[in-house]
Image (cartoon, rainbow, N blue to C red):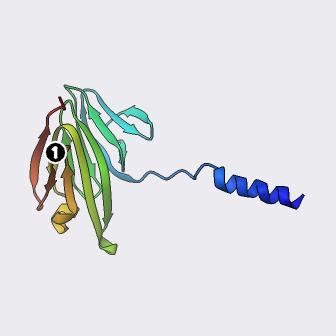
Amino acid sequence: MRASWITALLFTLIFAPAAPVLAQEIGVVKSVEGDVVIRRGGGAVAAIIGQSVFLYDELQTSAGGSVGIMLDDGTALAIGGASDVVLETFVFSPSDDLLDLVIRVLTGRLIYSSGKIGMARPEQVRIETPRLVVGTRGTRFAVIVPPAN
């Protein structure tokens, strides 16, 4: 009897699904124009003003769409039409001296304006595209990534 209980426990520990990882809220939607979809955890929702954005969210805009995002450190992102952008890394813990930001622009347009991470540790901010990585130095700039052919 005891062996079957131990076997069942081991089976449960080995094959049970892992506990879900809690999504980390990293900012908020400040503006939306046209069709904007946020892809998260295998699902998708239409973006609305005031909605939270989370680490690993993928923001997709239609040809006439755009979305403005404010991250928790004050970084402002303006994503233009026909864009696909992923919020890849966001670590903002100044008291622990942990600052890191990576945004991946798969296609489309992004205007980036530095927040506290970019001002305090510009070397820790990267905007990645399929062809290059942009390092920042506490600034504002635009990135345009044409669709793949």
Residue 124: name its quadrant. bottom left
Residue in the picture at 30% in, 56% down: 72
Q: Secondary structure at mark 1?
A: loop
Percent across and percent down for residue 84 are: 25, 36
Q: Is residue 22 visible?
A: yes
Question: How many numbered marks have been drawn onto this rendered protein structure?
Answer: 1
Work out whether residue 116 can be spotted. no
Q: Residue at x 22, y 29 (%)?
A: 65
Instruction: Locate residue 125: give its quadrant.
Output: bottom left
- The residue that appears at 22% across and 34% down in the rendered structure is 83
Camera-side residue: 62 or 30? 62
Q: Please, is residue 88 above or below residue 144 in the view?
A: below
Q: Quadrant of residue 91?
A: bottom left
| Along the line of sight, the residue nearer the viewer: 51 or 90 | 90
Quadrant of the frame with the C terminus:
top left
Amino acid marked by disc 1: Arg
Residue situated in front as seen by the camera: 48 or 92: 92
| Residue 141 as seen in the image, left or right of residue 118 | left
Location of residue 14 in the rendering, given as x and y in whole percent from the top left corner: 65, 55
Rendering coords of residue 113 (x, y %) = 15, 52
For disc 1, the marked residue is 131
Using a 10 Å C-alpha cutoff, classify the residue at mark 1 as few (fewer than 14 neighbours), some (14 to 19) or many (20 or more). Answer: few
